[in-house]
Image (cartoon, coloured by chain):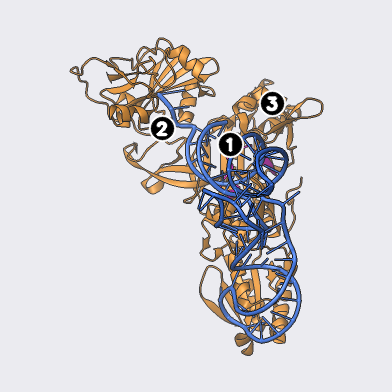
Chain colours: A orange, B blue
Amino acid sequence: MELGNFVKTGRNMRYSKALIPTVKEVPAEAEIISHQLMLRAGLMRKLASGTYTYLPLGWRILTKVMNIVRDEMNSSGAQEILMPSVQPMELWAQTGRSVDYGKTMAHFTDRHGRENVLAPTAEEVVTSLAAGEINSYKQLPFNLYQISFKFRDEFRPRFGVLRSREFIMKDSYSFHADKESLGETYQQMYDAYCRIFARCGLEYVIVEAESGEMGGSGSHQFTVPCENGEDVIVYTAGNKYAANIEKADVDALPRAAENKDIAAMAEIHTPGAKTIEEVCKFLKAKPKKLIKTLIYKSDDKTIVALVSGDMEINEEKLRIIAGGSIEMANDDTIKKLTGADTGFAGPVGIAEKCDKLVIDHSVAAMAFGITGANKTDYHLAKVVPGRDFPLEGENVIVADIRNAVEGDTYQGKKLLFRRGIEVGQVFELGTKYSKKLGCKFLDADGKENPCLMGCYGIGINRIVASAIENGHDENGIIWPINIAPFEVIITPAGNDENIINASETIYKQLTDMGIEVLLDDRDIRGGVKFKDADLIGIPLRITIGKKSIAENCVEIKLRSSKDIEKVPVENAATKANEIIQSLKVK
RNA sequence: CGGGGUGUAGCUCAGUUUGGCAGAGCGCCUGGUUUGGGACCAGGAGGCCGUAGGUUCGAAUCCUAUCACCCCGACCA
């Protein structure tokens, strides 16, 4: 599977010979603008849920993005390789990710009964490769990358290519003998990413991120802010602090003053009221008066987490405290632990029964609250944290385990929220994979050590979608020139011989100059050509019509502007070339 | 995986309530008139009404099953 490996996009094209099936009407299935325009501009067609065929224009754009990525990766010293898309499940079992990755992993059994994974990423493969090749610190460091298809059986593919089941990713993996070396490469990748996104014409923000299933410590996410993004970025004014919502720290809320006068706990009959919503309705209370009790399993340990009823738990934060992967406990486990049906769990008396009780600051800050009674169909009111359940102890911890919300502060500064599309992420992996897969080297002292690793990903398709999300108007796409399918479109408006001749001449001149040019030689009305040119978003248009050709002139217009410049026919190609070169981000 | 919705022409969708000739707009083909912002006139092609079964004299329409696609949710304690 070769993904445009150093394939130069063809230089020129006649529209009449090209498959560019534009559509006027908005496809019913497309919700967000990038998805709509990718279909309308004839970039791609859907095959099945979350899988798309890229048509000539769409593939040109992807190819251009891949070539920018490749160029910057190569200049940063990374080496391109290509790993298989079909990987043995065994390898994933060795790192434990066959479980951690869960159902998102697409897999199949082959005719010999072996389980195979359709690569969602390649840490296992590359680490086992390195394990076989690395013996000495003298071989380190190195950085390998590939550009290839990735598969994820998303529970819900949506937003066109933003969350699809099959997509193109650039993934690279670096191997090091020490932390300094890892830090250096991490910084090189960070800088390379900045250049890549700048060259793709994207405005991006870099945020502190959580490393999720990847495991590891440091991580930054490159995010393109836009309304339709699936990620939420949290930041303080002036961008002094910016983080993914999965990561964003919040200040602890002020604790309620100690009040000895609060009456003792009271049991209330709440038949059938299992959810926060139902309890609130039943008791006419506000969610923030409730203590939400969530029960998780981490391996064979039971973890109970408490969050204010109006807040969301942040499973990533909890996962770090748990020290391993976590999942919601099933009804049986809950019943065994609390003695009640799901929906009536509470913190009173739970610390003695569970392996760990993690209390969010938002709960510790309450004067008193309502919570489950660990008895089916009953809740407790006037439950005072610290009095009715412990806030400290061997297996009790008060911590930040919730998502930031409007009104929160960090280091005293107000937190702001914005949506974005994640287009790239860099991770310091450490030794998580090298230890498990035996990727070791001998250091100068002859001692054996696991390699330190970093990994760095870029979503190629997401770059395209986010460029559209932030680059369009009511008429269609407005491409940044570096990733536009063509740099110029020539639009002859009319069939006069001198119009055709001038078009052909300029077409040839631009081609010879190395410009990527599309000639709209279709025998149709001018209006249709203009609409199509705008829809597919070619940055520069050269229009040749009756009026202008009478003065021996053509019109040059930027897709992004209304201004039209008249230029003599013989200067047109040179002038267009000049504009294009000035637009390019080097 | 749970809830909701939709499958009818290449696309967007009517028609289903109340069973009775398969529809419109856009697109496509032919001819003509047009020709700088998705033209107009005339003619035409194109559908096993998602699939399978059932009810009925008769099913796009009613019933059952199934598949696909879309939306919401998966924070439930």
Are discs 2 and 3 both within one chain? yes
Q: Nearer the viewer, residue A158 or A210?
A: A158
Q: Name the residue under label 3.
A: A439
Instruction: Name the secondary structure under disc 3.
Output: loop
Mark on residue A155? 1
Of mark 3 and mark 1, the one earlier in the sequence is 1
Residue type beneath disc 2: Glu
Tell me the element at label 2: loop
Q: Residue furthest top?
A: A352
Q: How many C-alpha atoms fall within 10 Å of the one at disc 3: few (<14), some, or many (≥20)?
A: many
Marks 1 and 2 sit apart, C-alpha to C-alpha, by: 21 Å
- Sequence-wise, the earlier of marks 1 and 2 is 1
* Picture coordinates of residue A120, whole percent (x, y): 66, 36
Q: Residue A518 appears at what percent x and percent y?
A: 69, 69
Q: Mark 3 lies on which chain?
A: A
The reply, left or right, for residue A569 in relation to residue A345 is: right
- Is residue A168 placed above or below A318 in the rendered structure? below
Q: Do the residues labelled 3 and 1 touch (CB within 8 Å)?
A: no
The residue identified by callout 2 is A312
Q: Which amino acid does label 3 sit on?
A: Cys
Dot 1: what SS? loop
**Image point (44%, 20%), residue name:** A342
Residue A380 in sight in this render: yes
